[in-house]
Image: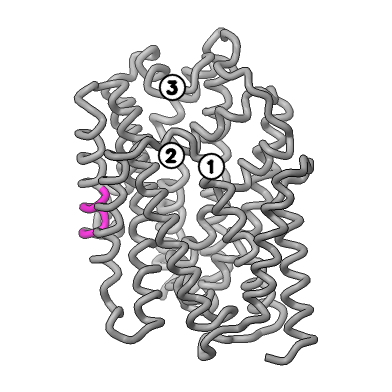
């Protein structure tokens, strides 16, 4: 690949993760940090995204160097059936995320153009399916134009929010610094089982993983700041109302719809890739069916968004953290320290045990108000335990 093509490839990675970061769900999560105030809230956002960003980078680098999708790399640490277990969990959380993205997008769109939540769910779901079928890279210039427009429109929205003269924050609920930090960690953490699906085909592993991490981390932090600023200055977490107040009716509607599509597309597409990883663990007949499974995941997410209320996502964020933070800690130890590859084994029980301990540690720490959150100590302990077990106990 020549230098120009490499630059285009890196630009594509940045474009992809910019679209992932511009998300109504991230803005809404940012509103939870408002009770901390500007200084503590911004500190929590930066530190949280720094912790999550390091894990995001290293996880993306594993796939970039190995050439394997996210869930295929997990088999390197846990074996075929262990990898299939996590791939199934990943499919469930990605279908859930797809539903949440569609639900939030439809709710906000209805606030601008009230034609019914279910109608907007169908419209957004259909656009996600179109993105999957055509392929985001095949949209070419249209995708670049869409992302440029989203960038400009979110800048406008940010300026509008910052010009508000301010009522009291819309929420009086108290949140500790540690809990706010953990919410900031949770967003990059939710992409750990996904990022490798989009870095695996690069010829520049470190650069591709770094560009993906920096773009997503900066944009996600920006979305958190918009949400927190809206809650502190505008006294509301309703982004649709802020847009209407600023006269961004149709423009605001476009922000909501396309930011939802560009984010939920990655969830649905990776759900298809993970489902394929489950099927290939059981036999070769699952190969090459990822796109069909992704369409199915988007359809299920759309139906779920129509049928079920999905207003509070904090429970899902913490569940994702408790499952996938220790999973990745074990993977990083296996790949970077132990240099092991267990994908030809049925299962590596040492690493399954280390993951289970990490899962329990995370859940127990949720009852302790740590200023550093739960993810960092969980990852460090699980990483050390898995490396120690592999060095001391023969498979």
Quick check: 86 left or right of 41? Answer: left
Range shown magenta = 128-133
Q: Which residue is mark 1?
A: 220
Q: Which residue is mark 2?
A: 23
x, y percent for residue 220: 53, 42
Mark 1 and mark 2: Cα distance apart in space: 8 Å
At label 3, counting other C-alpha atoms closer than 10 Å, the crowd grade (few under 14, some 14-19, many 20 or more) is some
Query: Where 344 sits versus 301, above or below?
Result: below
Q: Name the front one of labels 3 and 1.
A: 3
Q: Is disc 3 in contact with disc 1, using a CB cutoff of under 8 Å?
A: no
In terms of secondary structure, where does tag 2 sit?
loop
Prevailing secondary structure class for the magenta stretch in the rendered image: helix
Q: Which residue is mark 3?
A: 238
Magenta stretch containing residue 253, yes or no?
Answer: no
Q: Earlier in the sequence, mark 1 or mark 2?
A: 2
Query: Where 303 sits versus 64, above or below?
Result: above
Q: Quadrant of residue 282?
A: bottom left
At 41% across and 75% down in the image, what residue appears? 1
The front one of 164 and 25 is 25
Q: Earlier in the sequence, mark 2 or mark 3?
A: 2
């Amino acid at each position: 690949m020549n230098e120009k093509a490499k630059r285009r490839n890196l630009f594509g990675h940045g474009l992809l993760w910019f679209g992932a970061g511009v998300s109504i769900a991230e803005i809404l999560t940012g509103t939870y940090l408002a009770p901390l105030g500007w200084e503590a809230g911004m500190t929590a956002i930066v530190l949280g995204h720094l912790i999550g960003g390091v894990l995001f980078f290293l996880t993306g680098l594993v796939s970039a160097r190995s050439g394997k999708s996210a869930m295929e790399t997990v088999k390197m640490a846990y074996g075929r059936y262990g990898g299939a277990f996590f791939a199934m969990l990943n499919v469930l959380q990605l279908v859930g995320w797809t539903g949440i993205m569609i639900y939030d997008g439809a709710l906000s769109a209805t606030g601008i153009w009230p034609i019914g939540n279910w109608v907007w769910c169908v419209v957004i779901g259909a656009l996600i399916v179109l993105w999957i079928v055509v392929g985001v890279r095949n949209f070419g210039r249209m995708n670049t134009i869409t992302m440029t427009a989203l960038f400009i429109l979110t800048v406008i929205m940010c300026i509008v929010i910052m010009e508000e003269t301010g009522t009291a924050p819309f929420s009086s609920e108290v949140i500790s610094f540690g809990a706010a930090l953990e919410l900031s960690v949770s967003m990059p953490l939710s992409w750990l089982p996904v990022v490798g699906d989009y870095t695996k085909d690069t010829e520049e592993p470190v650069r591709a993983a770094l560009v993906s991490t920096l773009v997503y981390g900066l944009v996600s932090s920006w979305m958190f700041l918009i949400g927190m600023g809206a809650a502190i200055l505008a006294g509301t977490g309703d982004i649709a109302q802020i847009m209407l107040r600023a006269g961004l009716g149709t423009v605001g509607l476009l922000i909501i719809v396309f930011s939802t599509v560009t984010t939920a597309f990655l969830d649905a597409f990776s759900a298809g890739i993970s489902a394929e990883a489950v099927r290939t663990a059981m036999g070769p007949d699952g190969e090459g069916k990822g796109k069909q499974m992704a369409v199915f995941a988007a359809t299920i997410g759309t139906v779920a968004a129509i049928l079920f209320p999905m207003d509070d996502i904090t429970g899902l964020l913490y569940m994702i953290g408790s499952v996938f933070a220790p999973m990745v800690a074990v993977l990083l130890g296996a790949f970077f320290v132990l240099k092991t590859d267990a994908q030809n084994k049925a299962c590596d029980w040492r690493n399954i045990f280390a993951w289970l301990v990490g899962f329990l540690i995370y859940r127990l720490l949720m009852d302790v108000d740590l200023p550093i959150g739960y993810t960092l100590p969980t990852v460090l302990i699980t990483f050390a335990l898995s490396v120690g077990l592999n060095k001391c106990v023969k498979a």
